[in-house]
Image (cartoon, helix red, strand yellow):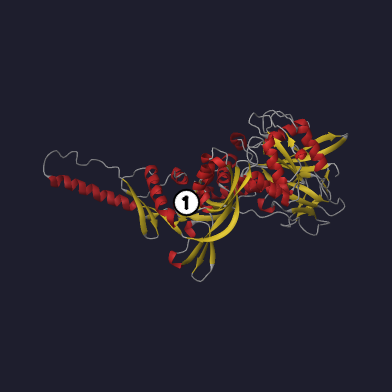
Amino acid sequence: MKNIRNFCIIAHIDHGKSTLADRLLEFTNTIQVTNGQMLDDMDLEKERGITIKSHAIQMEYTYKGEKYILNLIDTPGHVDFSYEVSRSIAACEGALLIVDASQGVQAQTISNLYMAIEHDLEIIPVINKCDMASAMPEEVEDEIVELLGCKRDEIIRASGKTGMGVEEILAAVIERIPHPEGDEEAPLQALIFDSVFNSFRGIIAYFKIVNGVIRKGDKVKFFNTGKEYDADEIGVLKMEMMPRPELRTGDVGYIISGIKTSKEVKVGDTITHIARPCEEAIAGFEEVKPMVFAGVYPIEAEDFEDLRSSLEKLQLNDASLTFQPESSLALGFGFRCGFLGLLHMEIVQERLDREFDMNVITTVPNVSYNVYDKQGNMTEVHNPGSMPDPTMIDRIEEPYIRASVITTTDYIGPIMTLCLGKRGELVKQEYISGNRVEIYYDMPLGEIVIDFYDKLKSISKGYASFDYHPHGFRPSKLVKLDILLNGEPVDALSTLTHFDNAYELGRRMCEKLKDLIPRQQFDIAIQAAIGAKIISRETIKAVRKDVTAKCYGGDVSRKRKLLEKQKRGKKRMKQIGNVEVPQKAFLAVLKLD
């Protein structure tokens, strides 16, 4: 146990975590790196160049004549995957904090750092990309010293591209990070920090042993679910899974026990022996709080059960996804899913399509509101369809967030304008160092759900970084905006919005739908309504045949007779015809700019 080190790599998005992990793996001769980012094994990760999943891998390294086992977890940097980071931190004793030498400390750097400090991890600061022409290692060192309060000589300068500083990083990991504490004689306690579904072997759980020893063939049980299993195979995680006869305190490994149903494996659960169980489960795992809700529906109604099993399998690998069944008038049966953000929602949709071959329709994303009735009872409303009657409502409270934006002073003006346009309230601003400033805003979560992050990136030329955490609920003047097609509401297009934005949003939605819905044999009225009040209307004109073409000359009553006959036909058609809303109309509503 003295020679085991468990550590993870944390940083802001694009600061070079995965590239540096490649160099560490190469230097310890764990693998030969053929193409970059070896740990990002999902197609989506390679295409987008981002890390979506944390990846655990074991390295062996000889330092001063002694052999050490280093368990490394590479984590994502994007704010939407911060739950992955919190789980990785719970399985480690130390962390490499990586900062880009050309960009300095950014929002996600700080929030991941605080998460690591809360878990009492030993932090090793590393400045990456020191080989770049635009690197400013001196200024970035000042920022890190101010942030961490460490000494200048504790900061390691490195480069993931050239491999500079890798040896110092490994030496620092061995010397500065404490070895795992635990008692091998105590009853087994192992923390599950991730799991994957394998169609041949069932569910594979990844764990870290806090106390005790586990051997192949042991009878084990999962503490929270109380289910009992045989440990058919245990082992450590290299690039592939390597079976081992036993794993001891401090080891990170996997267990295969032929688990078929995904409900039985909970991330954050504790594994223990049946014969000699531990007293209590391991603490330190917070439940995930979804930020954005959207309905996910199968395109074919009979695929509902397939979608359920696909979501369950995906949830094993992505514990921050939550879902529950719901139904909609327009789309039939589906699921109300909770995501950590818009990128997370997009990735889940892509993974359903690629890994499970599920084609789905996603409704307009929204957040959950607290609705109070006249008697003072509160109900939580996740989608506009379940809003009570407006006459029954006393007040509606919406969730607020405390957002922190780190930017250079050149972009303060446009960023403040953007935040005020999203109903933000300035809390304070602080200068970090030189010309970098951190601005704190209180903002409604519903306003930043759809396009805030993209706009922030474009007005700051990619330099501003953004991070947020929930900050309670506040009463707000919200209304339900319905879209009616020929007087029939389409529940998948309804949204809850602030009263001041409702008119503008309704008008833009009607204009957009007019372009996207194909013309029919009859007029289609597209209306936006708040309650019974219509606030905007567009009409898609009918496709008409020229019925008077054969009348040349003659009495006008002949023409009128033909036009009246056509009018009656159109009226009858309007009564029985219904309007199909194409999938791209649902998606276009999200990108209303």
Q: Position of residue 221 (x, y in %)?
A: 77, 54
Choose top left, top right, bottom left or bottom right for residue 96: top right
Q: Please state the total of marks drawn on the protein image.
A: 1
Q: Position of residue 189 (x, y in %)?
A: 79, 53
Camera-nearest residue between 126 and 188:
126
* Residue 495 falls left or right of residue 192: left
Which type of secondary structure does the marked residue at label 1 adopt? loop
Which residue is located at x 52 percent, y 47 percent? 416
Quadrant in which the N terminus is drawn:
top right
Camera-nearest residue between 438 and 524:
438
* Residue 565 falls left or right of residue 306: left
Quadrant in which the C terminus is drawn:
top left
Choose top left, top right, bottom left or bottom right for residue 406: top right
Q: Residue furthest front?
A: 434
Camera-nearest residue between 279 and 256:
279
Can I make out residue 30 in this image? Answer: no
Can I make out residue 51 in this image? Answer: yes
Local packing at callout 1 (Cα closer than 10 Å; few below 14, some 14-19, many 20+) is some
Which residue is located at x 54 percent, y 50 percent? 304
Q: Residue furthest bottom?
A: 375
Which residue is located at x 70 percent, y 36 percent? 127
- Looking at the image, is 268 positioned above or below residue 414? below
Q: Which residue is mark 1?
A: 331
Which residue is located at x 51 percent, y 43 percent? 455
Q: Position of residue 313 (x, y in %)?
A: 63, 47
Q: Position of residue 273 (x, y in %)?
A: 81, 54
Camera-nearest residue between 31 and 146:
146
Kind of residue sitting beneath label 1: Leu
* Residue 11 falls left or right of residue 523: right
